[in-house]
Image: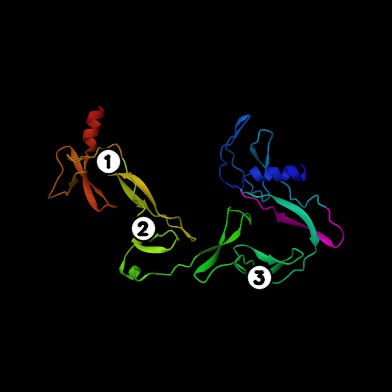
């Protein structure tokens, strides 16, 4: 495989490890889902049908010869669509620095010879922002350094006076400048669920921030295979086990998310109808 072929293969290869590859439509058909046991840091080889295999692309420096005094360096190729390829190039041998470990989200600074130093890359240097703006780094793809560019955005206040008076479990609505407002965010706003279902906000807990944002999901008032009792306005009929019991053939089912109970057709009635 030559260098050009390797780059093309990289662009369409998957980085997944221990997970199924997505189905890919090719002229020969649809690629089968395949789980690879080994992670390929330089991408996976694509077969003649355009399908990903579990064979790894070789290290670009393996067959790359450099002149005396230089060493082979693997550098990413900037691209707009991930995953981006890597290529081999020759450069001066780099000194080994003993750096204090840092969390550098965009990698370390490199000198004119391409040698890594101990300082983090700072893409916000020289960002032409005004006093009421801040410079942020915008990533156009989730891998490597492809598409990274600085961007000036409005400087938002850390908090507003109204925030101390409000309890917004899902955060605050944002304005057109992505700054917080005094309105609580409601993930279910605008969501229309089918009959016999209500909108619930699902919150996912995670060990490493940032956690996924809460999202809306339509859930049933009643257990599976049970039917909800509705009134003349097509609204769910609420109940309490003692004061407002359900009519015969219905059970009072408690929905913890709504902190209320609703009349659902009894399971024994459903079984009789099925028989």
Query: Are dots 1 and 3 in contact, CB under 8 Å?
Result: no
Note whether 202 is above or below 45 in the view shown.
Answer: below
Viewer-proximal residue, 170 or 240? Answer: 170
Asked whether the viewer can see residue 56, the reply is no
Asked whether the viewer can see residue 253, the reply is yes
Which residue is label 2 attached to?
Answer: 185
Note whether 109 is above or below 26 in the view shown.
Answer: below
Viewer-proximal residue, 44 or 189? Answer: 189
Residue 10 image offset from top left, x and y in percent: 67, 45
Which residue is label 3 attached to?
Answer: 119
Q: Residue at x 43, y 63 (%)?
A: 179
Residue 221 image offset from top left, x and y in percent: 27, 44
Which residue is label 1 attached to?
Answer: 196
Question: Does residue 221 appear left or right of residue 38 in this picture?
Answer: left
Judged from this view, the residue extending furthest toward the top is 275
Frontmost of labels 2 and 3 is 2
């Amino acid at each position: 495989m030559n260098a050009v072929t390797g780059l093309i293969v990289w662009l369409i290869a998957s980085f997944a490890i221990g997970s199924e590859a997505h189905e890919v439509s090719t002229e020969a058909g649809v690629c089968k889902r395949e789980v690879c046991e080994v992670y390929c840091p330089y991408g996976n080889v694509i077969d003649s049908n355009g399908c990903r295999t579990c064979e790894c692309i070789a290290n670009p420096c393996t067959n790359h010869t450099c002149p005396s005094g230089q060493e082979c360096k693997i550098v990413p190729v900037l691209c707009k669509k991930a995953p981006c390829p890597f290529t081999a190039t020759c450069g001066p041998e780099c000194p080994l620095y003993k750096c204090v470990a840092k969390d550098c989200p965009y990698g370390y600074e490199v000198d004119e010879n391409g040698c890594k130093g101990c300082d983090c890359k700072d893409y916000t240097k020289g960002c032409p922002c005004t006093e009421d703006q801040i410079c942020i780094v915008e990533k156009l793809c989730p891998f490597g350094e492809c598409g990274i560019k600085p961007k000036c955005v409005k400087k938002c206040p850390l908090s507003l006076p109204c925030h101390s008076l409000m309890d917004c479990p899902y955060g605050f609505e944002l304005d057109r400048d992505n700054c917080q407002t005094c309105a609580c965010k409601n993930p279910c706003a605008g969501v229309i669920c089918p009959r016999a279902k209500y909108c619930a906000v699902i919150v996912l807990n995670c060990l490493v921030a940032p956690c996924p944002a809460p999202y809306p999901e339509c859930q049933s008032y009643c257990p599976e295979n049970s039917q909800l009792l509705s009134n003349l306005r097509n609204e769910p009929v609420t109940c309490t086990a003692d004061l407002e019991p359900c009519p015969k053939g219905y059970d009072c089912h408690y929905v913890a998310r709504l902190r209320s109970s609703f009349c659902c057709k009894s399971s024994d009635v459903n079984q009789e109808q099925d028989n």
